[in-house]
Image (tube, helix red, strand yellow):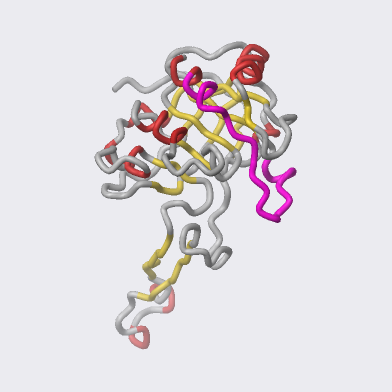
Amino acid sequence: MEAPAFPYRRVVDLSRRLVPGQSEHPWTRFDARVESIVADPASTPVEGRWYVVTQLALSGHAGTHVEAPYHALADGAAVGELPAERWFGQAVVLDLSDVVWSAPVDLARLRQAAARAGGIRPGDIVFLRFDWDERATGDGAYPPYPTNEALRWLVEQGIKLLGIDSPGLELPGDRSLTNHRTLFERGIPLIESLTALEQLRSSRFYVFAAPPPAVGTDAMPLRVLAFEA
């Protein structure tokens, strides 16, 4: 696979830090425990006594994370089974930060945002910006979400990866997971809980967002970096 060449002057980190103990919820927790692997510290030179292994206990949905088709499809691909090409490439951010909280984003509104961003190209990575961090009230209010018609249109443009800066994009109360299935049945992973999208200076940039090639998991935290020219 030929390595891509792209010019850039600025890097924006769009991922959240994973801090041990920050969340105790079983769906989002992250814990790190450092263990010494020096068996005989008394006879070990001082310089060699700090020799450790970190044990991690975490949810695949901790922090900024990607959901693979296996999240909602029993026969869907797990994170480590998705092709490497999914995780990097040209990206575009659609500014939906003025959408009313808990309201649907219909097809007309999504197409308008795409036009303002310069359009969506086949093979693009697309990020939806809702400004979750600034607008979330903390009282369980539902973020904006795309209608299924709007999401299907987005998929039909040939995108390969979708990201959002909120905790989810499912239709409220839809236990059949219509929006998730619209993505996953076409092999498109979903990145949730992005941050700092408002720091991007242009609507189009280059993204690298690779998770570890973990087999047998529906989701995995990842580092998302945007490279701006």
Residue at the spot x=41%, y=30% of the render?
Answer: 183
Residue at the spot x=69%, y=33% of the render?
Answer: 199
Q: Nearer the viewer, residue 99 or 121?
A: 99
Q: Is residue 190 above or below residue 106?
A: below
Report the number of discs.
0
Q: Which segment did they paint magenta?
A: 132-152
Looking at the image, residue 86 sits to the left or right of residue 61; the answer is left
Looking at the image, residue 49 sits to the left or right of residue 169; the answer is left
**The image quarter in which residue 89 lies:** top left
Q: Position of residue 207 (x, y in %)?
A: 50, 29
Q: Is residue 106 above or below residue 34?
A: above
Q: Is residue 153 above or below residue 78?
A: above
Residue at the spot x=52%, y=64% of the render?
Answer: 25
Looking at the image, residue 103 sits to the left or right of residue 220; the answer is right
Q: Position of residue 151 (x, y in %)?
A: 51, 25
User: Which quarter of the rendering shows the N terminus?
Assistant: top left
User: Which quarter of the rendering shows the C terminus?
Assistant: top right
Give the farthest residue toward the bottom.
Answer: 42
Q: Nearer the viewer, residue 178 or 74?
A: 178
Q: Position of residue 187 (x, y in %)?
A: 34, 29
Looking at the image, residue 61 sits to the left or right of residue 226; the answer is left
Give the farthest residue toward the left.
Answer: 75
Q: Is residue 45 above or below residue 115?
A: below
Residue at the spot x=43%, y=39% of the render?
Answer: 177
Q: Position of residue 5 (x, y in %)?
A: 45, 19
Q: Is residue 207 magenta?
A: no
Q: Nearer the viewer, residue 42 or 186?
A: 186
Q: Is residue 146 magenta?
A: yes
**The image quarter in which residue 146 lies:** top right
